[in-house]
Image (cartoon, coloured by chain):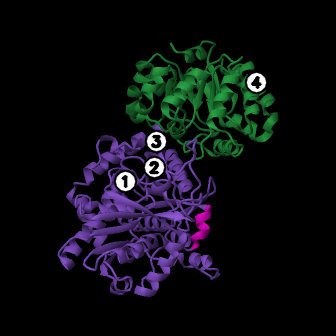
Amino acid sequence: MSNIGRAFENGKAFIPFITCGDPDLETTAAAVRAAVKNGADLIELGIPFSDPTAEGPVIQAANLRALSGGVKTDRVFDLVRELRTDVTVPMVFMTYANVVFSYGAEKFISTCAEAGIDGLILPDIPYEEKDEFLPVCRKYGVDLISLIAPTSENRIGMIAREAEGFIYLVSSLGVTGTRTEFSTDLDSIVGIIRENTSIPVAIGFGISTPEQAKKMADVSDGAIVGSAIIKLLAKYGKEAPGHIGSYVKEMKDAVR
Amino acid sequence: MTNKNGRFGIHGGQYIPETLMNAVIELEQAYDHFKNDAEFNRELAGLFNGYAGRPSLLYYAKKLTEDLGGAKIYLKREDLNHTGAHKINNVLGQALLAKKMGKTRLIAETGAGQHGVATATAAALMGMECVVFMGEEDTKRQALNVYRMRLLGAEVIPVKSGTATLKDAVSEAMREWTTRISDTHYCLGSVMGPHPFPTIVRDFQAVISKEIKEQMLEKEGRLPDAVLACVGGGSNAIGSFYHFIGDRDVRLIGCEAAGRGIDTFETAATVSTGRLGIFHGMKSYFCQDEDGQIAPVYSISAGLDYPGVGPEHAYLHDIGRAEYVAITDEEAVRAFEYLSRTEGIIPAIESSHAVAYAMKLAPAMDKDKIIVITVSGRGDKDCAAIARYRGEDIYE
């Protein structure tokens, strides 16, 4: 089992998403530590991209705030190295294919492994295009995380059988952002995934309240929350880490 | 030209969220079926000829030819199509396909507004719902087209994210498609995006080069020496090139928007200044910074103001089959004015980029040579912007 499996050993997992450099990298570091201290099982770190096509308005704005603050890919790697002096929970990157491709797949993924990143989530790399990065990910022991959506239908088994680390199950149609309704057949999707793989399944997109997180974790192995945390960063800026800590505690208590 | 998974050499592919994968697979299967369906092709030909006004003229520009003093110049008059541009060719094809697939709603992105107007037109004709995403900046530059789309019954959504231009309109249309797939077809306006769009759009636009070839053989008894077209995403260019790709003696020249110059940051000339990347569903050349962040490109032409280029163009560039040149705002505006005065034809500012290169190329060629310029659209929509560029304020 990869290092990511450890995130699912402490009851159902709670996985917060934080955009690196929003509003600055010091705040990101403090936010990660606050989340870990309050029970986060795995940290999903977003490397900002100019045109994040899978994101709703909240995370789009975070990407732009981070980029206008001058965040560079190399500074994000420095952040990870600094976090790894004391943070031991698994950490994965979420970014877009061009950020990795532009840096050079081999250089990017080997640096991930060296700095202490356990996995890579690329929402614009579907099953058909994963050979772009998968061989290099395997070479350096970085899990390329597969996403499954409510529209995946006949593709679920195929994706699940080859998935690594954990499966990111998209809760509903559309882009990231808080919402009130979720796909009604998550239960049966998880069922098909379970028939095809033993790796954990976490559900993300649109989850913001403890009740929603509990509901999602009940049918899977964990809940991923992005926009709700990014809203705290947008509202409180450098003062956000304290608020993120309390929020993570409440959410972890709900899912565990 | 495409192999499996829609590759043109190393370019193309399907770099999109999993949520959309079954939608593009369904589209590919439907297209593979209907492209060989006699009834579909009969209906499409009926729309082309009976509604859009095809075939478009291949017009011998005698005054232009004499004034430039070199190669004989023909204009492929896509500006004479219904709705005033080549965009209608692709839209009629996709709308008919969507209808056959049981879709009731079309969404589209638009830059200059020509593709949006064409999509709104096809939706009106076929009784479909239509939503068009347009960068807020472009809704100001092209206010007349916004009104036309609304008049045709479409909803126009101004996109405020990013640079509020064409690339942001594409991103927003993709986002919208992920929220509503079952009844909605994304009517992509250029030879870009994930497979099968670059192939579908090229096939529907290929009617341009099919006609040029027939018309040229009829008028001159031979093929042209060069075909020129402007390139943003590249749909009118690939349409103009396609049936000549195998004719190695025909030069294929794509004219990109250099904006204020390819040595400035205010440019949209992707082949000249971009590098290989992955964006908007495809691998191709993109204007981007050293970290892979997509560049905020600029051109006076809202239709060429895009940081990427279609994957088949990237491939034709790689293998040296097509040439790509960069034309500045100033050169394009001069060509806009020049063609208007010389031939009484007001070209779109996009098409003016191709005219501008012909103004350099034709005088350097012998009089027995022939070039074809595709006038992809008409320039009425641009008059207010060009007047502003020349320091004159007029009411639209």
- Residue at the disc numbered 4: A34
How far is mark 4 from mark 3, CA to CA?
Answer: 33 Å
The reply to whether discs 4 and 3 touch (Cβ–Cβ < 8 Å) is no
Colour in which the image shows chain A: green
- Residue at the disc numbered 3: B16
| Pointer 1 or 2: first along the chain | 2
Magenta residues, dominant SS class? helix
Q: For residue B144, what is the image quadrant? A: bottom right
Q: Bounds of the magenta span?
A: B136-143
The reply to whether discs 1 and 2 touch (Cβ–Cβ < 8 Å) is yes
Q: For residue B137: magenta?
A: yes
Dot 4: element = helix
Q: Mark 1, mark 3: which one is toward the viewer?
A: 1
The reply to whether discs 4 and 2 touch (Cβ–Cβ < 8 Å) is no
Residues B103 and B242: in front is: B242
- The chain letter under disc 4 is A
Instruction: Please tell me the numbered disc located at residue B285.
Output: 2
* Residue B363 seen: yes
Dot 3: element = loop
| Pointer 3 or 2: first along the chain | 3
Q: Position of residue A214 (x, y in %)?
A: 64, 24
The reply to whether discs 1 and 3 touch (Cβ–Cβ < 8 Å) is no
The reply to whether discs 1 and 4 touch (Cβ–Cβ < 8 Å) is no
Instruction: Please tell me the numbered disc located at residue B317.
Output: 1
